[in-house]
Image (spheres, grey):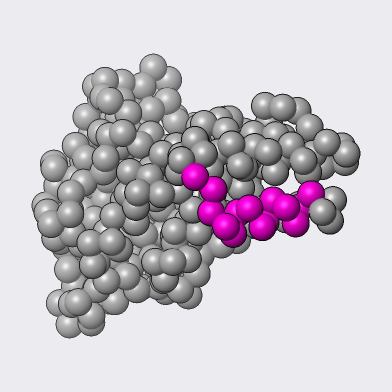
Amino acid sequence: MAMPSVSVVTPSYNQGRFIGRTIQSVLSQGIADLEYVVMDGGSTDETVAVLEGYGNRLRFRSERDKGQPDAVNKGIAATSGEVIAWINSDDVYYPGAFQAVLEVFANRPEVDVVYGAADHIDVDDAVIEPYPAEPFSLSRLKDQCIICQPAAFFRRRVVERLGALDLRWQYTLDYEFWLRLAKGGAVFACLPQKLAGSRFYPETKTSGAKVTVHAEINDMMVATFGRAPDRWLCNYAHVLVRERWKLGEASPFFTPAVALAALRASWRWNRDVSPVLWRTTASWLTRGLIRPGGAA
């Protein structure tokens, strides 16, 4: 069984305290002829010194870019492996991840994307919680990002056929990519094995900009499917009320505020309100409670 060649791309910017752990998790996979490139956005911390310490075990470029999707795209263009692994400079692979994934690609030539289970980890690599990965379903993927980015690997052919990352999306770049591939007919395979740790801490860009992230999700959904799903509109409303309007769930105004925010969000993104959302918000107001369905 011939294993496909693999290229690893790491976009990086000022993650010197973590990038060594990321690199070690890649190089320790034990894959022959591994091609590894780090596209650094001109870091001003110790990142470049860390990268230089690995000599010819990886290639890197440090220069200003247009953000994370631009860095990933440059890395893809600078590599040649049949399978592409993309891992950010604060995440890690678990031992045996590459072997498990490449065996799927070798045995199932029809598969375009392989992803597995993963964890959210803290700054010390301790597990916070499992990432909510699920067997693949486009309808479920539209409701929730069930694919953990560092635990996903894809064939170069899908980039050639369906395009690389879209520079419009700075927060939802991976989510949009999976949705676009699925919409374009790519075949996904899910492994039950844990493949990676996705670092979660207050300084991550998604943690510090929850309202902006949820707004971009809705923008991206409209661009991709012509409509933002009710679930994401409700999640946006929940985050907006909690983060911007500063209302906690113990407040008697919390539920009506979320209902109002969800209706306004639906009009903002969809220019209408679905019958389901009308019934949902009416139910919240009637019962005096809210179940936003996984708002972050």
Q: Nearer the viewer, residue 222 or 171?
A: 222
Vertical side of 142 occupied by 176: above or below: above
Pinpoint residue 283: horizontal percent, then vertical percent.
75, 56
Pinpoint residue 7: horizontal percent, then vertical percent.
21, 53
- Which is the main secondary structure of the residues drawn in magenta? helix
Report the magenta residues as a range.
272-285
Number of marks present in the image shown: 0
Which residue is depicted at the point 61% across and 47% down?
234
Which residue is depicted at the point 34% across and 56% down?
179
Which residue is depicted at the point 19% across and 77% down?
110
Pinpoint residue 116: horizontal percent, then vertical percent.
43, 67
The quadrant of the image that shows the N terminus is bottom left
Pinpoint residue 87: horizontal percent, then vertical percent.
37, 48
283 in the magenta segment: yes
Q: Is residue 169 left or right of residue 181?
A: right
Q: Quadrant of residue 256?
A: top right
Q: Is residue 60 left or right of residue 129?
A: left
Vertical side of 138 occupied by 41: above or below: above
